[in-house]
Image (cartoon, rainbow, N blue to C red):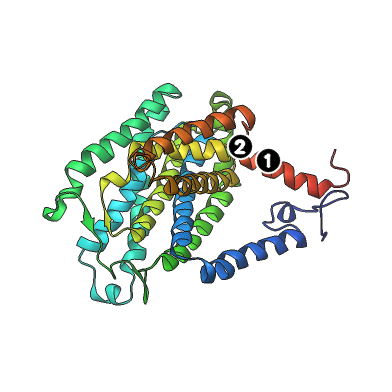
Amino acid sequence: MSTTFLPCSVYHEDYTQDHAWWQTKFVRGKMILLFLLLFVVIPPFADAYVMSVCNQIGYTILGALGVQLLIGYCGQVTLGHAAFLAVGAYTSTLLVLEFPWPKFLLDWGLAYPISIIIAAIVAGIWSVLFGLPSAKVKGFYLILTTMAAQFVTVDFVIAQYVSKIGGRGQAFSLPPGTIKIGPWVIDSDRKVYFMMLVLVILCVIGLANLLRSRAGRAWVAIRDNDISAEVMGINVVKYKLLAFFVAGFIGGIAGAFWISNLAAISYEHFPWFWSLWLVGVILIGGVGSIHGAIFGAIFMVVVMEGLQLAVMPLADTYPKLLIYFLFIKEAAFGLAICAFLIFEPNGLAYRWWQIKNYFNLWPFSY
């Protein structure tokens, strides 16, 4: 049964209709407009600064999707997700710079795309390693084990050993032309932007479909009550580790993507605060919703960029504002989380859901 809106009447007659991505002509129209906006309207008119902000939003979305899966859908609290982004970034960088690729792969520009896949798998396996304690502990104790992933991975393994491979002191330089997909050299913010859109769309579609599968239903059951889930026959340990693998896999993609936006990569790009930042993104966007990761990333990046633009004109009069801007940014981050927990505890995704329902049910929006 085909309808334009869905406020009344019978809508779905079979399982396929019920789980369709775009269930009405109105929704299809909105999505087409969104694709046109992202791929056709924004790129020609946006300057380098706007492109860099968009790329930062995309990077934050990719990082937050894994955190959303662990916390929002599986109930596994994590405060060390930046470690898996770092693993993905360094794995991809080492493969591109150090691995002896066959000449035909280099000529065809396949080294970097292949490195993204390998980096995602390595980050996923590394995530499972630190997810093993989730079989025995949860809550506060699981927080400590995920924090250990951050400090062991970034501050010890990468900082002391990986970053010095090839006689380097700290950073891996990424010369122009290093990041290449097929015949296209990713050497501008606009090209990075298009790659970011493709990766975000693929990760969102993949995660959304996974959440509607047997594994997704198992994760939600574990989140709600892991004892009841085990009684129902769900292998709790197996699905917890699968959640850690998928979250690390997406984090590895995020890290491998981010090197395309950098001239040099250092472990300082993945501090512990970034792990905390990603948790704040899903708290503000809405826990347990893919929309929450997207809205939270947009909100946090835009607000912080707006704050920086507001501070810049005052820098001539108060030069210390630039010196202390990092502390101002952290204070604004904390205040934003407190404000949302008090006034909008369900996040921006819930507000978006209410707005959609208002228009879908109008004029009977009671």
Instruction: Give the residue number, with chain letter if any, for mark 2.
Output: 347
In this figure, what is the number of numbered marks?
2
* Amino acid type at mark 1: Arg
The quarter of the rendered structure image containing the N terminus is: bottom right
Camera sees residue 233: no
Residue 192 placed where, x, y %?
A: 42, 64
The quarter of the rendered structure image containing the C terminus is: top right
Q: Which one is nearer the viewer's eye here, 220 or 94? A: 94
* Amino acid type at mark 2: Gly
Q: Is residue 336 left or right of residue 99?
A: right
Q: Which one is nearer the viewer's eye here, 16 or 359? A: 359
Q: Which one is nearer the viewer's eye here, 292 or 54? A: 54
Residue 268, located in which quarter of the rendered image? top left
For the view shown, which residue lies furthest in the front direction?
317
Residue at (70, 43) in percent of width and height? 353
What number is the disc on residue 224? Answer: none
Dot 1: what SS? helix
Residue 344, located in which quarter of the rendered image? top right
What number is the disc on residue 351? Answer: 1
Camera sees residue 204: yes
Circles 1 and 2 in contact, beta carbons < 8 Å: yes
Q: Is residue 193 left or right of residue 162?
A: right
Q: Is residue 337 left or right of residue 52?
A: right
Residue at (76, 62) in percent of width and height? 25
In the depicted structure, whether residue 231 falls above or below residue 327: above
In the depicted structure, whether residue 18 falls above or below residue 240: below
The answer for how far apart the CA atoms under marks 1 and 2 are is 7 Å
Residue 273 placed where, x, y %?
A: 37, 36
